[in-house]
Amino acid sequence: MIFKQLLEADSSTYTYLIGCEDTRQAILIDPVLDTVERDLQVLKDLGLTLMATLETHVHADHLTSAKRLKGRTGCRTAYPKMLGLPCQDIGVQEGEPFEVGSVSLHPLFTPGHTDHHHAYLIDTPIQKFVFTGDALLIEACGRTDFQSGSAGDLYNSIHNKLFSLPDETLVYPGHDYEHRFVSSIAQEKARNPRLGGGRSKEDFVALMDGLDLPYPRKIDFAVPGNEACGECPADVPEQFRGPCAASDQG
């Protein structure tokens, strides 16, 4: 398996490149419009063909580059199947592996941050990797106060789906805001201040309901844009229009 963890700094979003050494096919999990040129160069440098982009959910803090990459490479767009977006080419759901050459990703339905969120598990003979999107972060978790979020659902998703994985499973989150890169299921069960150490569901729900987080600065255009696979809405504020204005011709 070919693997790279890539960062978009403005939203602290991790994009993950997963590739098959035999077929030279690759996917990008949660690619960001701002870094499309970098991602295309990484694919070129590694001699990989992008077969698809794969989203964990409809993001509220950045625009996906799914549409731009499809136009540039001919790749397909993959989203959780339950969304039924007109722009998605592939619908993924739990119980149906997503194949990248000889690499299999197993979708895990993990609602709570949004009502359609999925994580993706890769189970190799040597190591297990889980890409947790905005559900489980390193010593944190995604917020639950918009996009049909639910603190109770998130608690259930993390404890029943993610914390039930073997302790040695590596956790690769969708974001990190403190320059951390990877965790493990064992570490999050022991050290996550919101979810670990045996915290009860009732305590977790009360904690999440009391966070009083600021309104996401890009949500008003990011959500509708991402429901169109990364099409830039007309109302994107001027300070965020740079990636939208970039030419699709390279």
Image: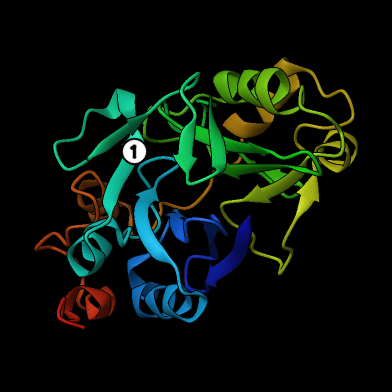
Which residue lies under the disc numbered 1? 79
Examine the rendered structure and indicate whether residue 227 appears above or below residue 147.
Answer: below
- Identify which residue, 212 or 168, lies in the foreground: 168
Estimate the x, y position of residue 32 in percent, counting from the top left. Answer: 39, 64
Query: What residue is shown at x 47% (from left), y 56% (from top)?
Result: 23
Query: What residue is shown at x 18% (from left), y 47% (from top)?
Result: 228
* Left-right relation of 11 to 71: right
- Identify which residue, 14 or 51, lies in the foreground: 51
* Left-right relation of 243 to 143: left
Q: Amino acid at mark 1?
A: Tyr
Q: Is residue 89 visible?
A: yes
Query: What residue is shown at x 55% (from left), y 70% (from top)?
Result: 7
Estimate the x, y position of residue 218 in percent, counting from the top left. Answer: 33, 59
Estimate the x, y position of residue 43 in percent, counting from the top left. Answer: 44, 72
Secondary structure under tag 1 reads: strand
- Identify which residue, 238 or 246, lies in the foreground: 246
Estimate the x, y position of residue 55 in percent, counting from the top left. Answer: 40, 45
